[in-house]
Image (cartoon, grey):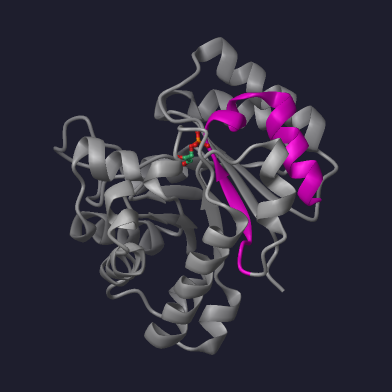
C-alpha cells in the first residue's frame, strides 16, 4: 500500500513573515493528520524559520533544488550537507522550471538526485512534457526518456527513497489541469516503466505524484486514480485553507 504524499512547492514566493505564517497555519490545521505524508518546499532562505514554525506537526520540509558537490568553492550553490543541517527530508530534482527556465538537463538532474540519495535526502524527481510535445503525441517518449536518464545508476534499494512527480508543463500555473484520465494514463505508463527498469516490487512501491494546477476542487478526482499517489502543489500550496483542504480531502 502506497501512503498518499502531498507536497507544496512554494517556488520563489513568500517572504520571511508570510512563509512563517503559512507554515504555522498548516502546522495548526494538519497536526492530527497521520494517513497522508505532507511536506512543504519553501525557498532556501526560509527553510530554517519554516522548519521551526512547523515544529512537531509532522509536516516534513524539502528544498526546491540542491547542488551535487560537497561543500566548497561553488558560489551560489547549496549542498546536501547544508540541507540536512536545516532538517530537510526531501529535495525536488528536475522541476520543469529548472529544466525549461534555468536550463537543467537530465544528466545534471541525475547527478543531483544521486547526490541527494547518497546524503540520505529523499528526492522528488519531476518529469513532464511540454504542450507541443503532448500535441505531437510524444508524451510517453519524453517522460520515458526523462525518467530513464534521471534514474540512471539508481539502485532498486535506493528507489525506496525516491518519489516521482508527473507534472505536465502545460498544466503548471495555467489553471489547466490534466484530466483524471490523462494523469492516470501517464502515471500507469511510468509505473510500467519502473517495472521494466527495476522490478514489480519497485513499480508497486514507488509513489507517483501529479502536479499542475492541482487545487481543492480537483483533488478527489485526481486522487481517485489507482496510480496517482499524491500531489505536488504550486499555487494552492501557498494558501493555508486550500492546502489544508486538499490534505483533508485525501486523509
Ligand atoms: P501549480 O499547482 O501552481 O500549477 O504548480 C505546479 C507545480 O509546478 C508544482 O511543482
Q: Nearer the viewer, residue 213 or 160?
A: 213
Q: Nearer the viewer, residue 231 or 219?
A: 219
Q: Main secondary structure of the magenta part?
A: helix
Reply above or below: 136 against 7.
Answer: below
Position in image of residue 138 (x %, y %): 29, 64
Quadrant in the picture for residue 103: top left
Q: Is residue 188 magenta?
A: no
Query: Farthest top residue?
Result: 17
Position in image of residue 151 (x %, y %): 33, 69
Q: Residue at x 68, y 34 (%)?
A: 243
Q: Residue at x 49, y 14 (%)?
A: 15
Q: Is residue 228 magenta?
A: yes
Q: Residue at x 70, y 25 (%)?
A: 240
Q: Nearer the viewer, residue 111 or 53?
A: 111
Q: Quadrant of the N terminus?
A: bottom right
Residue stretch in magenta:
227-251
Position in image of residue 160 (x %, y %): 53, 72
Q: Residue at x 27, y 59 (%)?
A: 136
Query: Farthest left residue?
Result: 73
Q: Nearer the viewer, residue 204 or 227?
A: 227
Reply above or below: 16 against 209.
Answer: above
Query: Farthest right residue?
Result: 32
Question: Does residue 207 show up?
Answer: yes
Reply above or below: 204 against 110.
Answer: below
Q: Say whether residue 41 is left or right of residue 242.
A: left
Question: Does residue 121 show up?
Answer: no
Give the mark count: 0
Quadrant in the picture for residue 115: bottom left
Position in image of residue 122 (x %, y %): 48, 57
Amino acid at each position: 500500500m502506497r501512503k498518499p504524499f502531498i507536497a507544496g512547492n512554494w517556488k520563489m514566493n513568500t517572504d520571511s513573515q508570510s512563509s512563517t505564517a503559512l507554515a504555522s497555519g498548516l502546522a495548526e490545521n494538519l497536526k492530527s493528520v497521520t494517513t497522508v505524508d505532507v511536506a512543504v518546499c519553501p525557498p532556501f532562505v526560509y527553510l530554517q524559520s519554516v522548519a521551526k514554525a512547523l515544529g512537531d506537526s509532522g509536516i516534513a520540509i524539502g528544498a526546491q533544488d540542491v547542488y551535487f558537490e560537497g561543500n566548497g568553492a561553488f558560489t551560489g550553490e547549496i549542498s546536501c550537507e547544508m540541507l540536512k543541517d536545516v532538517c530537510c527530508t526531501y529535495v525536488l530534482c528536475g522541476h520543469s522550471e529548472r529544466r525549461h527556465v534555468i536550463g537543467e538537463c537530465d544528466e545534471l538532474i541525475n547527478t543531483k538526485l544521486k547526490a541527494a540519495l547518497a546524503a540520505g535526502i529523499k528526492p522528488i524527481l519531476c518529469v513532464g512534457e511540454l504542450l507541443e510535445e503532448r500535441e505531437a503525441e510524444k508524451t510517453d517518449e519524453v517522460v520515458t526518456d526523462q525518467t530513464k536518464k534521471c534514474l540512471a545508476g539508481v539502485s532498486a534499494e535506493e528507489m525506496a527513497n525516491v518519489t516521482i512527480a508527473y507534472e505536465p508543463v502545460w498544466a503548471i500555473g495555467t489553471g489547466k489541469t490534466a484530466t483524471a484520465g490523462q494523469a492516470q494514463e501517464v502515471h500507469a505508463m511510468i509505473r510500467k516503466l519502473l517495472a521494466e527498469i527495476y522490478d514489480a516490487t519497485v513499480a508497486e512501491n514507488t509513489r507517483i505524484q501529479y502536479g499542475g494546477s492541482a487545487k481543492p476542487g480537483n483533488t478527489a478526482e485526481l486522487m481517485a486514480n489507482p496510480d496517482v499517489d499524491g500531489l505536488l502543489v504550486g499555487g494552492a500550496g501557498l494558501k493555508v485553507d486550500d492546502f489544508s483542504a486538499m490534505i483533508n480531502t485525501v486523509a
